[in-house]
Image (tube, rainbow, N blue to C red):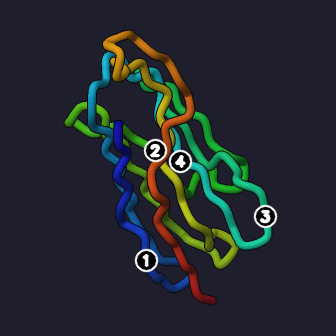
Amino acid sequence: VQLQASGGGLVQAGGSLRLSCAASGSIVSNYAMAWFRQAPGKQRELVASITSSGSTNYADSVKARFTISRGNAKNTVYLQMNSLKPEDTAVYYCNADLVVINGGGNYEASKDYWGQGTLVTVSS
């Protein structure tokens, strides 16, 4: 199973970016997908999550500025980031809570599927 994240970049404060993440592989079920971020010298933190039924959850610091959504293509998720601030600068990671078919042909559930990270830099 692979998670491919994209969309990061350099933007001025007040600007917008849209992150994308696509999960691929032997996926049986997709319970939830999420975006985390890790700024230099800080712990990784949850930014936003969305369940298979569409329920969303946001960190207080991004509420009303960021929107997480699922794509029409199965196993894709987006993070629309508006009104970006310098403190949003971080590496953003896509995460998925999946049931997959493992190498032994068995179902395996895990919340520990991660993308490679995409850097978002917001200049002041």
- Distance from disc 2 to disc 1, alpha carbons, whole Å, reads 18 Å
- Distance from disc 3 to disc 1, alpha carbons, whole Å, reads 20 Å
Q: Give the SS element for disc 2.
A: strand
- Contact? badges 3 and 2 (CB < 8 Å): no
Residue hosting label 3: 42
* Circle on res. 9: 1
* Circle on res. 68: 2
- Distance from disc 4 to disc 3, alpha carbons, whole Å, reads 16 Å
* Circle on res. 35: 4
- Contact? badges 2 and 4 (CB < 8 Å): yes
Residue 53 appears in view: no
Query: What residue lies at 34% left-to-right and 22% top-to-bottom?
Result: 103
Q: Amino acid at mark 2?
A: Ile
Residue 68: x, y in percent? Answer: 46, 44
Q: Earlier in the sequence, mark 3 or mark 1?
A: 1
Q: Give the SS element for disc 3.
A: loop
Quadrant, the C terminus: bottom right
Q: Earlier in the sequence, mark 2 or mark 4?
A: 4
Q: How many marks?
A: 4
Q: Amino acid at mark 1?
A: Gly
